[in-house]
Structure formats: C-alpha cells, structure tokens
Image (spheres, helix red, strand yellow):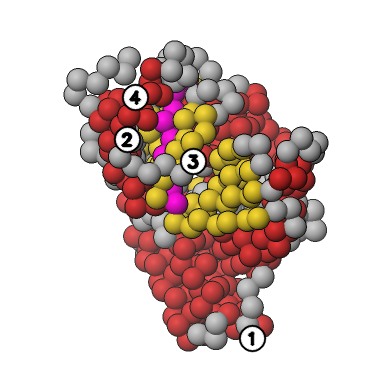
C-alpha cells in the first residue's frame, strides 16, 4: 500500500483533478490510499466567511458561500457533464453548502467565532473536495470509495490545532482503510480534518493534509507516502524568492524537517515525524509534471555541508530578562510551561546567564501569555522579525560553512543566532524585510556560479 496526497492546487479545478486521476491510475497495483486537500483557496475563503459573519456582515458572508457553491458545481459539471452522476454529486455538495450557510447564519447571530465553530466551518473544504474527487475518479474507471476523514483521524479537542491520537488513528485505519485497499478499491478522504471521540469536528492546523497523509501512512506502515504539489520537489530555496533554486533529489529526514519548520512551504513540518517513526520514505512530486524525478526524503541521503536555505517572515521575537535565572534550577522549565499552557509553539531559543530569547510564529496567543511571562521577569517584544535558516547535515563540521554564512550577512543586523542541537541548522533572526535579500545572498554564496559548497 501507498498513501498518495494531493494538495489544493493539485485538485484545484477539473483539469487538475483529471491529472490526479491519471496519476492514481498508474499506481493501482500498489493499492493507493488517496488524501486530498480542499480546492486551492477554499480554506482561506471559509475562514474569511467565518470572520465576516461574526462581524455582522452576513450578506457578504452568504454571498461568499454561494460563490463556493457555484465554483464546486461548475467543476463537477466540467468533470462529469450532463449526467445522472453529476446531478447526484451536485445534490450532495449543495446539501453540504446549505449546512455551511446555516452555520454562517448562526455565527452571525452569536457575533463571535470560537475555535470549535472555526473548525466546523473550515472542514467543509475537504468534505467537498473529497466527494468531488471520488466522483471524478469513478468517471475515469477508478474504483474510488469515499471515507469520512473524521472517522479515521481521531484527535483531542484542541480545536484549530488538534493533536492526533495515534493509537486510535491506527485502529481506524486498519479497520476502515486497509480492507478497501486490499480489495483493490481506492479509499479517498480529506486531509486536515478529524474529530474527537465525541464526534466533534477538529482540524490539524493549516497545511495539515500532509500530516494526515503521514499519520495514515505510519498507521498502515505503507511502502511510501507521496505528496503531490505544484512544484518539482524540495529545492535549495523557495523559487518564488530565489532565482535559480535547484531541485534536491534526495534529502535526509532531519534536513527536510528543519527546512519545513523554517519556511519550506512545500511540506508541512509535522508530515515528517510519523514517517520517521517507522522509516517510510516520503516523495514530494509535481502533479503538473508527473514524469519529473521529485524529491525523495529518506534516512539514506547525501551528507552535505549546506543542503538548502529556508526563510519566513511574520515572526515575533520575545526577550525575557531576569536575575532569577542565575544559578536557579528549573527556571527554563517554568518559562516553557507558560508557552505550553497557552499552546504557543516556540521555534528558536537562545539563552545567556540572565536572559532567554525565543521566537514564535503565531502571535495570536501573545496577549494571553504575556502576563504569565511578566511574572518571571522583564519582557520585551519585537514584532515583524523573520528567520533565515541554513540547513545541511554536515554544516557544523569544521565551522567553515557557518563562517561563510555569517560573512554573507556582514552588513545585515542579526537579532539572534542559534545552532540546532544536532548542528544541521544555523538559524538567524533578522528584520522581516531582510528575509528575501538575505536568502538570495546566502543562496548565491553556497549555490551560485563558482560557489564551493560541496
């Protein structure tokens, strides 16, 4: 068995879904299980609908709901034509969108968006796309079977960023997915969404469809997990930022995890961990060019001083300073307990005798956690920062390549510097507007003409 996951652009319209069907057709003998994202842009539209409705702008929100209805109906007609199958599918999807409209009206009445209601609304993207993909696959002769992801992806109740219950997911996957695949049928389910044991809809956080695919792959110990997207694979840098970014045909699990965490948007950061746990190779491939080599993420990858450059903006830098840190046992644990209680994920950490600096991606919980932090010491906040990471399995060997990275940034203010515990990631916190130029400078240093990065 293999898991085949298609991202939003890979199921973004009728043409993309037909390409996905042709890809799956070539893999029938490998017993594929298919995981799909919402159609491109739909999740953002759903979240905007929720916010708009809660602000009292019901007419605009309902208009957006009807826009989603029209888009899905049009793609169904393009895929299935004027057929009984199309009429049946459109009826099912229209009923779902009616439910979405009712939820939108309820939010308008309440005037508030809770994490639980946000998950309920956000889940409709995958619910709709998975039904559409099943119908299209069947039209192409594939024996597709729809499976409600909420019956498989069992989570806790931390809405908008739910934590998967690995044992429950394994049991459900063995019970619901494995028999279908073994019988030659093709299970299709939405990624990103799950449910609690009380059957309340949850989501795994933005980009969580990759995570869903990896969790299912690990649960069934499949031979591979394939992530189909709109780029050729993992590259030496984001091609939207850096011209001349090169394909990486083979990357280590640890390198891929670091790159995904620090801005390589081709892969969700959490997608690596379930695969690593059971040693399943992960392929990143381009659904627009299925003949391409793509990237293989595996334990057996070349050890390079520098594999790639990653970067992201919108980072918040928090500095905590207190003399209480000096020779005090357990202070760091107390500090990180604050972030744990508020479910705020920390990216980069640097410490001294009396201070700790750290970064967070999501500042939505900042106001809530600041009072607790201020009980520990003086706190300063620096917004609009960015992170640039130089990643390579042999980066720290000898120090030469770290020195080259720092020389390349000689005229750029660096607010924080950190080398990962494994020595494969040198992370620099810079001003947000400097992220793109710094990435280009570092890429030229290590991958440009004449660079000696071997």
Secondary structure, mark 3, is strand
Quarter holding the C terminus? top left
Question: Mark 4 or mark 2: which is in front?
Answer: 2
Give the CA distance from mark 3 to mark 1: 46 Å
Q: Say which mark, if any, is on residue 416.
A: 3
Secondary structure, mark 2, is loop
Question: Residue drawn at (53%, 51%), measured in percent from left and top?
Answer: 317
Chain-order first, disc 3 or disc 1: 1
Give the CA distance from mark 2 to mark 1: 55 Å
Secondary structure, mark 4, is helix
Q: Say which mark, if any, is on residue 109.
A: 1
Q: Is residue 391 magenta?
A: yes
Q: Which residues are magenta?
A: 385-393
Chain-order first, disc 4 or disc 1: 1
Of the pair 396 and 34, the residue shown nearer to us? 396
Question: Mark 3 or mark 1: which is in front?
Answer: 3
Total numbered labels = 4
Give the CA distance from mark 4 to mark 2: 10 Å
- Above or below, 410 against 115 in this view is above
Q: Quadrant of residue 270?
A: top right
Dot 3 crowding, Cα within 10 Å, few <14, some 14–19, many 20+: some
Q: Is residue 219 left or right of residue 330?
A: left
Q: Is residue 104 magenta?
A: no
Of the pair 371 and 188, the residue shown nearer to us? 371
C-beta proximity under 8 Å, tags 2 and 1: no
Q: Main secondary structure of the magenta part?
A: strand
Of the pair 137 and 446, the residue shown nearer to us? 446
Identify the residue position indicated by label 2 in the image. Answer: 410
Chain-order first, disc 3 or disc 4: 4
Q: Quadrant of residue 428?
A: top left
């Amino acid at each position: 068995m293999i898991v085949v996951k298609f991202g939003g652009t890979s199921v973004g319209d009728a043409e993309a879904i037909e390409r996905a069907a042709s890809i799956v057709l070539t893999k029938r003998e490998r017993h594929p299980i298919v995981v799909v994202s919402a159609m491109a842009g739909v999740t953002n539209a759903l979240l905007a609908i929720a916010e708009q409705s809660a602000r009292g702008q019901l007419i605009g929100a309902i208009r957006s709901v009807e826009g989603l209805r029209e888009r899905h109906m049009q793609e169904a007609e393009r895929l299935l034509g004027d057929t009984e199958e199309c009429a049946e599918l459109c009826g099912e999807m229209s009923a779902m969108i009616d439910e979405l409209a009712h939820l939108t009206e309820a939010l308008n009445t309440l005037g508030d968006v809770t994490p639980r209601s946000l998950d309920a609304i956000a889940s409709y993207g995958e619910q709709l796309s998975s039904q559409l993909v099943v119908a299209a696959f069947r039209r192409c002769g594939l024996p597709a079977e729809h499976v409600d992801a909420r019956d498989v992806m069992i989570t806790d109740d931390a809405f908008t960023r739910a934590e998967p219950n690995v044992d429950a997911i394994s049991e459900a996957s063995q019970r619901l997915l494995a028999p279908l695949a073994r019988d030659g049928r093709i299970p299709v389910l939405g990624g990103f969404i799950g449910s609690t044991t009380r059957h309340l809809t949850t989501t795994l956080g933005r980009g969580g469809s990759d995570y869903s695919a990896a969790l299912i792959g690990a649960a069934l110990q499949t031979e591979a997990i394939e992530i189909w997207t709109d780029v050729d694979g993992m590259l030496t840098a984001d091609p939207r930022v850096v011209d001349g970014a090169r394909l990486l045909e083979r990357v280590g699990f640890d390198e891929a995890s670091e790159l995904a965490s620090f801005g390589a948007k081709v892969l969700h950061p959490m997608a690596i961990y379930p695969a690593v746990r059971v040693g399943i190779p992960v392929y990143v491939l381009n659904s627009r060019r299925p003949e391409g080599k793509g990237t293989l993420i595996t334990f057996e990858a070349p050890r390079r001083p520098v594999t790639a450059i990653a970067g992201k903006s919108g980072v918040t830098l928090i500095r905590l300073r207190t003399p209480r840190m000096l020779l005090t046992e357990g202070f760091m644990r107390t500090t990180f307990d604050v972030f744990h209680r508020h479910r705020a994920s920390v990216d980069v950490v640097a410490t001294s005798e009396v201070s700790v600096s750290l970064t967070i991606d999501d500042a939505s919980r900042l106001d809530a956690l600041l009072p607790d932090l201020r009980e520990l010491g003086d706190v300063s906040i620096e917004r609009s920062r960015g992170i640039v990471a130089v990643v390579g399995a042999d980066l720290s060997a000898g120090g030469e390549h770290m020195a080259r990275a720092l020389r390349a940034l000689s005229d750029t203010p660096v607010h924080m510097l950190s080398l990962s515990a494994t020595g494969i990631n040198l992370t620099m916190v810079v001003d947000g507007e400097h992220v793109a130029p710094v990435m280009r400078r570092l890429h030229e240093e290590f991958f440009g003409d004449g660079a000696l990065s071997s």
